[in-house]
Amino acid sequence: MSGKYDDIINLPHHVSATRPRMPLTDRAAQFAPFAALRGYEAAVRETARRTEEKRELAEETRQELDTALHRIRERLAEKPRVRVTWFVPDPRKDGGAYITREGAAAQLLPLERLLVLADGTRIGIGDIAQIEWI
């Protein structure tokens, strides 16, 4: 059986007279895997990350929230403790998440439409889904 490389198959391995041999560790690095699609895995994780849609509140729930905010405004000097659940939009994709935090109500800013807790948390009144007294 004869092949197209028969004339060179038994020749000695070439060794350069001018260049040193490459160390095996450097040679192995040539064949190491690399990130051909840098950032791809992060993009896949971001796409898979779940967000919630902002729920539309029933009229009854809106009235309950208005009543709770009115009570907070009346008692601001007492710094009433409340548990507030509100919607926070996701900065990178549609939707967001509902967050619940407990704290003392420190300010109610009607012009900015904000409820401010004593720890400095600023909550948009239009994003509030629930207020509980604690």
Image (cartoon, rainbow, N blue to C red):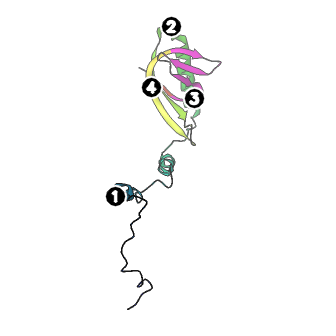
Q: Secondary structure at mark 1?
A: helix
Q: Is residue 62 above or below residue 74?
A: below
Mark nearer the viewer, 3 or 1: 1
| Residues at marks 3 and 2, CA–CA distance in whole angstroms | 24 Å
Q: Residue at x 49, y 51 (%)?
A: 44
Q: Is residue 98 visible?
A: yes
Q: Earlier in the sequence, mark 3 or mark 1?
A: 1
Tag 2 secondary structure: helix
Q: Residue type at mark 1?
A: Leu
Name the disc covering residue 101, or none: 4
Residue 53 percent location from the top left of the image:
55, 41
Question: Which residue occupies 38% across, 66% down?
Answer: 15
Instruction: Residue 75: tell me if it is visible.
Output: no
Q: Is residue 6 left or right of residue 74?
A: left
The residue beneath circle 3 is 62
Alpha carbon separation for disc pair 1 and 2:
75 Å
Q: Residues within 10 Å of mark 1 (few under 14, many from 20)?
A: few
Query: Which label number is shown at residue 77?
Result: 2
Mark 1 or mark 2: which comes first in sequence? 1
Mark 2 → mark 4, Cα distance in angstroms:
20 Å
Instruction: Check disc 1 and report the residue beneath it.
Output: 24
Query: Disc 3 and disc 1: Cα gap in Å?
Result: 72 Å
- Residue 109 picture location, percent across and down: 60, 16
